[in-house]
Image: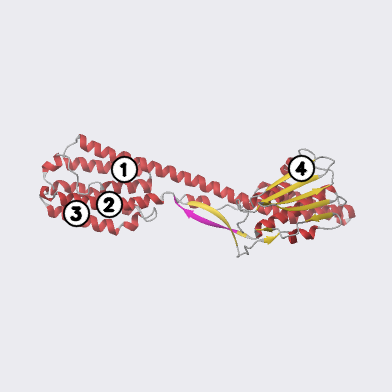
């Protein structure tokens, strides 16, 4: 079944932008509330009212700007910080001096921290340090002197914004790492699928051409030799894992978590499928097939992959046990799983041969059997005793584990 990769994009920093949007709205209302409850201490209330009109219009109009990193441009950040600094510097003009000396809040109050936090979320801790430094200087200027309260407020904003900026940088680095891991997982899974298909088709044909050509001799022997060379080259290519480079890492560098999801190119039937008709064609003079009397239902993909794994096991019997070897297929329909056993009376597999074959790029057991079962949430157990044949037990759960019932 053909598949394609769909990329789902998520961002772990997006909740920070939503929180920043809410913070700006709430702190705007808080600053206005402070003004309303202390109007009698304003020597020029019209200055404060004019500033708050600008603050309300600016905050509401720029909500889309703090919705995500792309919308929050450097030009917006500069203008936003100017609005905050202007409010701080206008405080001595609008408020009586005694309130300033006693440590009263500035006109924008804690709304100023929102402008600094925007720098932190957008550019990291260095941008946050720059913005908080300017805010600290503006606070000292409006007070006319350096006091303990001023130092406390400046340090609080500076430390908080730098910490958030650092967390954002760490989160983005984690996104890139995770995106790379997902990219490797997706490409490895696709390589394994292609390796199975190639092993079950092209490599088997090339191996057959090589054997028949060598047996016939003459020009056919030369054709067989060339087929053998191509088989080796193709096995090397498959085992080497040469796969196209995904754009996952590029997308992650923009602050997006990328997740690769396998999808079928066309809609498929997801109704359960009887496994028996898929295995029955293997029955013959050298292969015995034992099945239950009732249908053995599995998800379509699980049934298809299990049948392909059985075919791969029988191919191994023909190739390694010889054409005269007998094989038996037994299907067991258990309450929670379907078990298919493929047994032969061949010479068995020498110890260490499977690991050696995988190193040589021969992926019949590793991918065509175990890989298929792993992808549908099942298991493949291989028992072989030299001189006593080989038995392969394939187990697929009826309840989906992983992709067993996904119908992908």
Find out whether residue 264 is within the magenta segment: no
Residue hosting label 3: 51
Left or right of 68? Residue 233 is right
Q: Nearer the viewer, mark 1 or mark 2?
A: 2
Q: Nearer the viewer, mark 3 or mark 2?
A: 2
Residue 216 visible in image: yes
**Which SS class for mark 4?**
strand
**Which SS class for mark 1?**
helix
Q: How many marks?
A: 4
Residue 26 badge: 2
In the depicted view, which residue is nearer to us: 323 or 169?
323
Q: Return the x and y of residue 354 as percentages of the image width and height.
A: 75, 42
Within 10 Å of disc 3 (Cα), the crowding (few <14, some 14-19, many 20+) is: some
Which circle's residue, 3 or 1, is located before the other in the chain? 3
Left or right of 112? Residue 278 is right
Q: Is residue 189 above or below residue 268?
A: above
Residue 130 badge: 1
Which circle's residue, 4 or 3, is located before the other in the chain? 3
Q: Nearer the viewer, mark 4 or mark 3?
A: 4
Which circle's residue, 4 or 1, is located before the other in the chain? 1
Residue hosting label 4: 383
Left or right of 126? Residue 32 is left
Which circle's residue, 3 or 2, is located before the other in the chain? 2
Q: Quadrant of residue 268?
A: bottom right
**Residue visible at 23% across and 50% down?**
30
**Residue visible at 82% across and 43% down?**
348
In the depicted view, which residue is nearer to us: 263 or 159?
263
Region of the chain picked out in magenta, as a range:
4-11
Q: Return the x and y of residue 181 as percentages of the image width and height.
A: 55, 46
């Amino acid at each position: 079944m053909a598949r394609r990769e769909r990329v789902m994009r998520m961002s772990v920093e997006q909740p920070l932008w939503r929180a920043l949007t809410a913070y700006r709205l709430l702190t705007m209302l808080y600053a206005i509330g402070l003004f309303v409850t202390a109007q009698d201490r304003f020597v020029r209330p019209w200055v404060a009212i004019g500033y708050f009109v600008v603050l309300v219009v600016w905050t509401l109009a720029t909500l889309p700007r703090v919705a995500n990193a792309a919308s929050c441009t450097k030009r917006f950040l500069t203008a936003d910080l100017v609005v905050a600094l202007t409010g701080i510097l206008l405080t001595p003009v609008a408020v009586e001096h005694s309130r300033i000396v006693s440590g009263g809040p500035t006109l924008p109050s804690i709304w100023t921290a929102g402008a600094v936090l925007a720098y932190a979320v957008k550019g990291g801790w260095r941008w946050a340090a720059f913005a908080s430094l300017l805010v600290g200087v503006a606070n000292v200027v409006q007070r006319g002197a350096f006091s303990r309260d001023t130092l406390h407020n400046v340090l609080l904003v500076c430390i908080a914004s730098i910490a958030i900026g650092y967390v954002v940088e760490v989160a983005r680095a984690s996104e890139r790492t995770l995106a790379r891991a997902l990219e490797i997982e997706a490409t490895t899974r696709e390589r394994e699928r292609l390796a199975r298909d190639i092993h079950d088709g092209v490599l088997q044909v090339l191996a057959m051409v090589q054997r028949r050509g060598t047996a016939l001799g003459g020009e056919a022997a030369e054709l067989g030799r060339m087929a053998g060379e191509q088989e080796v080259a193709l096995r090397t290519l498959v085992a080497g894992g040469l796969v196209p480079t995904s754009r996952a890492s590029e997308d992650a560098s923009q602050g997006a978590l990328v997740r690769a999801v396998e999808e079928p190119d066309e809609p498929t039937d997801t109704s359960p499928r009887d496994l028996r008709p898929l295995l029955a064609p293997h029955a013959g003079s050298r292969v015995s097939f034992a099945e239950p009397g009732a249908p053995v239902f599995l998800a379509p993909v699980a049934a298809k992959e299990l049948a392909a794994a059985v075919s791969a096991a029988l191919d191994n019997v023909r190739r390694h046990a010889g054409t005269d070897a007998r094989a038996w297929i037994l299907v067991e329909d258990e309450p929670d799983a379907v078990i298919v056993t493929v047994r032969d009376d061949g010479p068995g597999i020498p110890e260490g041969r499977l690991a050696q074959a995988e190193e040589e790029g021969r992926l019949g057991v590793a991918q065509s059997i175990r890989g298929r079962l792993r992808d549908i949430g099942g298991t493949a157990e291989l028992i072989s005793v030299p001189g006593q044949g080989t038995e392969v037990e394939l187990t697929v759960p009826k309840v989906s584990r992983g992709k067993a019932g996904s119908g992908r």
